Amino acid sequence: LAVRSCAAVVFGATALGLAVYRRPRRALAAGGLALTLLTASGAAVYATWNPKSVLEPRYSGLLSSAPSMVGNARSIVADFDVYQRELARLVTNVTQLYEATSTLPAYQPDPTTMRVLHISDVHLNPAAWHIVESLVRQYKINVIIDTGDTMDHGTSAENGFLEPVSDLGAPYVWVRGNHDSASTQRYLAGLKGAHVVDNGEVVTVGGLRIAGIGDPQFTPDRSAAAAGDAVEHSAGRRLAEAIRARKAAGAPVDIALAHNPIAARETDGTVPLALTGHVHHRRTQVLPGGTRLMTEGSTGGSGLRAVDDGTPDKVQASVLYLDRDTRRLQAWDEIDLGGLGLAKAEVSRHLPAENRPGATPTPTTP
């Protein structure tokens, strides 16, 4: 190949030089120059050639997260057809999931009740916005609360995914998760109808006083080391201090928001209700100090992570019913939709212990 390349270059350059200059000496000089350049290029290639670079690629920008999404470089070719099929299913099942939500029974609202839709961990799943929009319409939702990880890698290129927030049909309250960057937070704060809570700040939306603190950790992929639970505890204590200050000022907070349940636990006793996400499965518990901690599953069905396992994750959201006067939780509906490839919808109604038949009512003072 080297000999043929050299012969072709020298012959071609000489012939071209002869055609242009019509002088043998200048034509031979052109052929010699071409041979010299070819030799120099070959030497540079030989000196820098590294066959391992094909097996150990480097990524930049959005591609820096590629290894964490599809495994190591050696498996990309072998597994690409599998991921391609699964990603296609993710897109096509947007329609299935939307149809499943559209068949949920319509809710006839009580004028004394406020309805809050709790979502979390969307992880860039486009189906989530269709689902949220459908639930807002059917349940006549007053406020949407998103406890973070709306993004997956936290890059500014993902910010366009947030555009539907302004058209969901209800005010949207958001707290930053560990997959959401400061850039994401700034972008979302500028959208119509969106309210960002952080650093213990309080917003009043739909008559509810809501305080929150963004996740102190930004760990969008495997390249970022987690700081550990200590920083979550510290963030939660700052949030609790802010809530106590508001209560002392005569404006008690109704709902506390944090992405990580570890942080939200620090607000126990300072607020009736705390909402979180992060762990991708739903859990509700009453903490020792009386605060009800509600952790939502993934409204995005874990996003692209759904293709990693054989069993697809459920798409989950909850509708919370709060008394309009006391702003206390009266009941909640847990909504589960089948994940990839499934179109099943389940709704279950739950009551706090104090609202169950035969229970002794609790004082309404927070």
Image: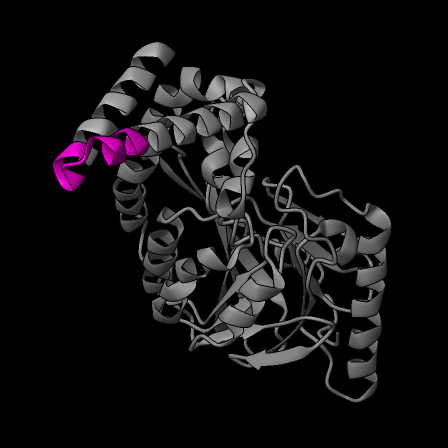
Front-most of 335 and 316? Answer: 316
Q: Is residue 21 magenta?
A: yes
Query: Is residue 132 left or right of 254 when viewed as pictured?
Result: left
Q: Position of residue 13 (x, y in %)?
A: 24, 30
Front-most of 348 and 140? Answer: 140
Front-most of 129 and 151? Answer: 151
Q: Is residue 189 magenta?
A: no
187, above or below 13, in the image: below
Front-most of 69 and 285? Answer: 69
Q: Position of residue 97 (x, y in %)?
A: 32, 42
Q: At 53% across and 55% down in the image, what residue appears?
A: 155
Considering the whole magenta stretch, tell me its main secondary structure. helix
Q: Position of residue 163 (x, y in %)?
A: 38, 65
From where the camera sits, is residue 268 visible? Answer: no
Q: At 31% across and 35% down in the image, what residue appears?
A: 343
Q: At 54% across and 38% down in the image, what residue appears?
A: 59
Q: What is the quadrant of residue 166 in the picture?
A: bottom left
Q: What is the quadrant of residue 170 in the picture?
A: bottom left
342, above or below 229, in the image: above
Q: At 63% across and 69% down in the image, what residue appears?
A: 328
Q: What is the quadrant of residue 20 in the picture?
A: top left
From where the camera sits, is residue 282 visible? Answer: yes
Magenta stretch: give its range. Answer: 18-30
